[in-house]
Amino acid sequence: MKFSLRTKLSLSYISVVLISVLLLSVSANLLLDKHFKDYITENQARKNKEIAFQVQQQYKAGGQWDTESIGNICLNALKQGMIIKVVDAAGQVIWDARLHDNAQCEAMLAHIATNMSSRYPNWEGSYVENAFPIANESGEVGKVIIGYYGPYFFTDVDLAFINTMNRLLIGVGTFSLVLSFLFGSVMAKRLSTPISRVIATAKMIAKGYFDDRVTEPSNTKEIAELTETINNLAETLEKQELLRKRLTADVAHELRTPLATLQGQMEAMIDGIWEPDAERLKSCHEEIMRINRLVGDLEKLAKYESENLILTKTAFDLSELARQVIQNFENDFAQKGVKIEFSGEKETVVADKDKISQVLVNLLSNAQKYTQPGGTVQVAVKGSADIMKIVVKDNGQGIAPEDLPHIFERFYRADKSRNRLTGGAGIGLTITKAIIDAHQGKVEVRSQVGQGTEFIISLPKLV
Ligand code: ADP
C-alpha cells in the first residue's frame, strides 16, 4: 500500500507529538506522584507536630485542660482528615473525636478512601495512629493521639491540584496534536506540491513534450536540485530532439542535389537524349562518389558526435604526430603549389592519438583546400606548463565574419558553390570540435577575408 508524502509527513508529525506528549505526561505524573507523596508525608509530619504543640498550649497549670479550645483544634484537624484523641497522664480521655462525632469521623475516612481509590484503584491504605507526648517543666502531662490514613492521603484540595495538572497536560497535548497536524499539513503541502509538479513535468517529457519546465521555486535544497535536474534533462532532450530533426533535414537536403543530378543524367541516357559515353558516366560516377563521401562523413560524425565519445588515451609526442600527418599531406600540398611549414619541439601529451590525428587531418585538408597556389600553411606545436597548443595558420581566402560563428555547425559551408566543387560537406570542423570538446580542450579561430585563417587548438596536457 502506498501513501502520499503528505499523509506520511502528517502522520509522522502526529506520531512524534503523540509520543512526546505521552512520554511527558507519564514522566510528569510519575515525578509528580513521587514528589507530591513526599510533600504530603512531610506536610503530615509538620501538621502532627503543630497540633501536638497547639494542644500542649491548652494545658493550664494545676492539671486543667481548656477542652473547648482543644475541641476546636481537633474539629479543625478532623476537617483535614485527622482523628484526634487527647488523654492526660493517667490515660483519662480529655477529648476524643470519635466520642464527639463518630459518624463524622467515619464519613471523613470513607471520603478519603474514595479520594484515594479514585486516583489509585489498587490503593490499600491503612489507618495509622501516632502518639505525641505533651510535656511541661514537671514532665509528661498527657498525649495527643493523631489517627489518619497512612502512609499518606490526599485531601480534596490535593486531589484538585493533581487533577488540574492532568487536565493541563491533556490540554497542552491536544493543542500540540492539533498544531502538529496543521503544521504537518502545511509542510507536507509545501514539499509535495513541487514534487508533484516535477512528476507532472517528467510525465510530459516521457510523452515527448520537451518544452515543459518546472517553474515553481523551492527553498528546499533537494527539491530545488531535483527541479533543476529535471529542467536540465528536459533542455538536453529538447536540444537532442532539435538536433535529430535538423540532422534528418540536413541529410535529406545534402542528398537531394547529387541524387537529382544523377537521376536527371540517368534518365537522359535512358531516354536516349544523351549518349552514355565515358565523360557522362564519369560525371555520374563523381556524383556517386560525392554521395559516398557524404555517407562516410555522416558515419564519422555519428561516431565522433555521439555524446559518450570514448577516448583511448596514451602519452605521445604531439610534434611527432603533426610531422607524420604533414608528411601524408606533402604530396597534395606540392601538387597544389602550397608551401607547408612546421615548427615545434618534442611535447608529450596524454590524449587519444587517432582522434587528435583526425583533427590535424581535418585542419590541414581545409588549409590546403582554401589556400590558393603560392600560399603557405604554417603548423606549430607549442607547449606550456599544462596546456598544449596546435596552431594551423594559412594565408588563404579567409572566412567572412558572418560565417565565422557558424563554421563548427554541421553541414555549414561558408561558400556553398565553391565548396560543392571542393567536395566538403561541412562536417570536418564539427568533428574537430567534438573531438576537442571530449578532451576538455577548446578550438579558436581567427580569420580575415583575403588574409588567411588561423585555427588554435588548446589541449590540457593531462586529461
Ligand atoms: P568542409 O568539409 O566544407 O571543409 P568544414 O566543417 O571543414 O567543412 O568547414 C566548414 C567551412 O568553414 C568550410 O566550408 C569553409 O567555408 C570554412 N573553412 C574551414 N577552414 C577554412 C580555412 N582554412 N580557410 C577558409 N575557410 C575555411
Image: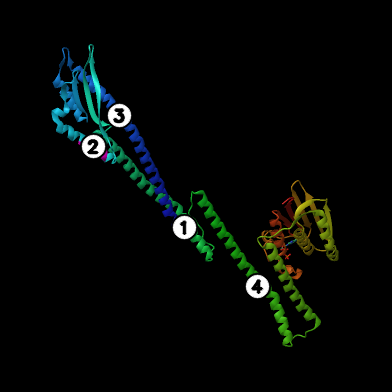
Residue 196 - label: 1
Residue 113 - label: 2
> Quarter for ligand 1?
bottom right
- Give the x, y percent position of residue 143: 22, 20
Cβ–Cβ below 8 Å for labels 1 and 2?
no
Residue 5 forms part of the magenta stretch = no
- Label 4, on which residue? 252
Mark 1 element type: helix
Mark 4 element type: helix
Dominant SS of magenta comes to helix
Is 301 on the left-hand or right-hand side of 214?
right
* Quarter residue 44 falls in: top left
Distance from the alpha carbon under mark 4 to that under mark 1: 41 Å
Q: Amino acid at mark 2?
A: Ala
Distance from the alpha carbon under mark 1 to that under mark 2: 62 Å
Which mark is nearer the camera, 3 or 1? 3
Residue 41 - label: 3
- Where 441 sits versus 373, above or below? above
Stretch of the chain drawn in magenta: 110-117
Cβ–Cβ below 8 Å for labels 4 and 2?
no
Q: Amino acid at mark 1?
A: Ser
Distance from the alpha carbon under mark 4 to that under mark 2: 102 Å
Q: Amino acid at mark 3?
A: Thr
